[in-house]
Image (cartoon, rainbow, N blue to C red):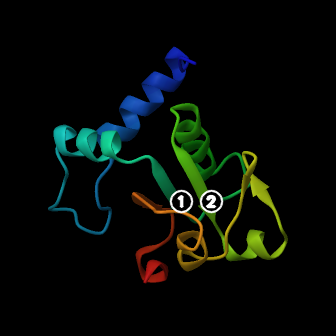
Amino acid sequence: QTPHSDDEMKWKSFISTASFATMPSFRNSDKVLGEILTRSKVVALVGASKNTSRASNEVLGLLLRYGYKVIPVNPGLANLNESVHGQKVYASLEDVSKEYSIDMVDIFRRSEEAG
């Protein structure tokens, strides 16, 4: 399945802007980001949301369309046995690690809340 051209534009935008928001002097090169995304197969997405207007929801869907195994992490949704984009939501990274070997963690939380 080939992603749509709109998805490709979003993906290129996502890759070109990916960096550490709290570290303005640090920015991964496109090459490094490409290597990380090529090697990663299982992504835990912390701060997953069912709200389609949130970036975490859009990125989760985009990663799924590109063939990644994406595990949403949100304790509130997990306690309600919810799913996001058809994926079971877990309460914590510790819970995810009991079932999956995580290659990459994508965090959609404020820095002070991310630990």
The x, y position of residue 77, in whole percent, is 76, 69
Rendered residue at 51%/32% (across/down): 66
The label on residue 72 is 2
Q: Residues within 10 Å of mark 2 (few under 14, many from 20)?
A: many
Please name the residue that numbered disc 1 is placed on: 45
The x, y position of residue 52, in whole percent, is 71, 46
Q: Secondary structure at mark 1?
A: strand
Amino acid marked by disc 1: Leu
- Dot 1 or dot 2, earlier in sequence: 1
Rendered residue at 34%/43% (across/down): 37
User: Mark 1 near mark 2, Cβ–Cβ under 8 Å?
Assistant: yes
Quadrant into which the N terminus falls: top right
Q: Residues within 10 Å of mark 1 (few under 14, many from 20)?
A: many
Asked if 101 appears above or below 11 in the picture, the reply is: below
Q: Please tell me which residue lies in front, 114 or 1.
A: 1
The x, y position of residue 111, in whole percent, is 41, 75
What count of labels does the image hold?
Answer: 2
Q: Please tell me which residue lies in front, 112 or 41.
A: 41
Tell me if 74 is positioned left or right of 3 in this view: right
Q: CA distance from mark 1 to mark 2?
A: 5 Å
Asked if 81 appears above or below 17 in the picture, the reply is: below
Rendered residue at 49%/81% (across/down): 113
The x, y position of residue 110, in whole percent, is 47, 72
Asked if 108 appears above or below 54 in the picture, the reply is: below
Q: Residue furthest right?
A: 80
Q: Secondary structure at mark 2?
A: strand
Tell me if 1 is positioned left or right of 113 in this view: right
Amino acid marked by disc 2: Pro
The label on residue 65 is none
